[in-house]
Amino acid sequence: METICPECDGPVAFDEAPMEGEIVECEECGVELEVTSADPITVEVAPEVEEDWGE
């Protein structure tokens, strides 16, 4: 199972079926990707975690 990285167009392979919301790393460019759909497998660049300054 694999899909294409939206950042570099490289292949993103999965050994087993991913779950929606799972975070994976592209082996080609190293960007973190979030699985947005498990069937068919689609991924988007994972949002950056913003720091909470107690607001």
Image (spheres, helix red, strand yellow):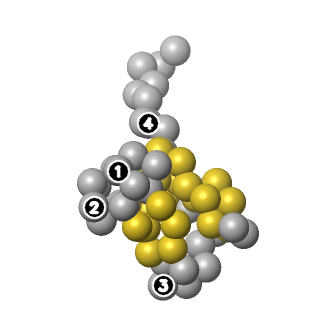
> Horizontally, is 26 left or right of 17 in the view?
left
List x then y, in percent, for residue 17.
Answer: 61, 79
Q: Earlier in the sequence, mark 2 or mark 3?
A: 3
Do callouts 1 and 3 mark residues in contact (Cβ within 8 Å)?
A: no
- The residue that mark 3 highlights is 15
**Alpha carbon of mark 2 to alpha carbon of mark 3: how far?**
17 Å
- The residue that mark 2 highlights is 28
In depth, the one of 10 and 20 nearer the eye is 10
- The residue that mark 4 highlights is 49
List x then y, in percent, for residue 39.
Answer: 72, 69
Which of discs 2 and 4 lies nearer the camera? The answer is 2
Element on which disc 1 rests: loop
The residue at the point 42 percent across, 19 percent down is 53
Amino acid under label 2? Answer: Glu
Amino acid under label 4? Answer: Val
Do callouts 2 and 3 mark residues in contact (Cβ within 8 Å)?
A: no
Do callouts 1 and 4 mark residues in contact (Cβ within 8 Å)?
A: no
**Alpha carbon of mark 1 to alpha carbon of mark 3: how far?**
21 Å
Which of discs 1 and 4 lies nearer the camera? The answer is 1
From this view, report whether residue 1 is shown above or below residue 33: below
Q: Using a 10 Å C-alpha cutoff, classify the residue at mark 3 as few (fewer than 14 neighbours), some (14 to 19) or many (20 or more).
A: few
Which of discs 2 and 3 lies nearer the camera? The answer is 2
Seen from this angle, which residue lies furthest front?
Answer: 9
Q: Is residue 20 visible?
A: no
List x then y, in percent, for residue 18.
Answer: 59, 72
- The residue that mark 1 highlights is 8
Which of discs 3 and 4 lies nearer the camera? The answer is 3
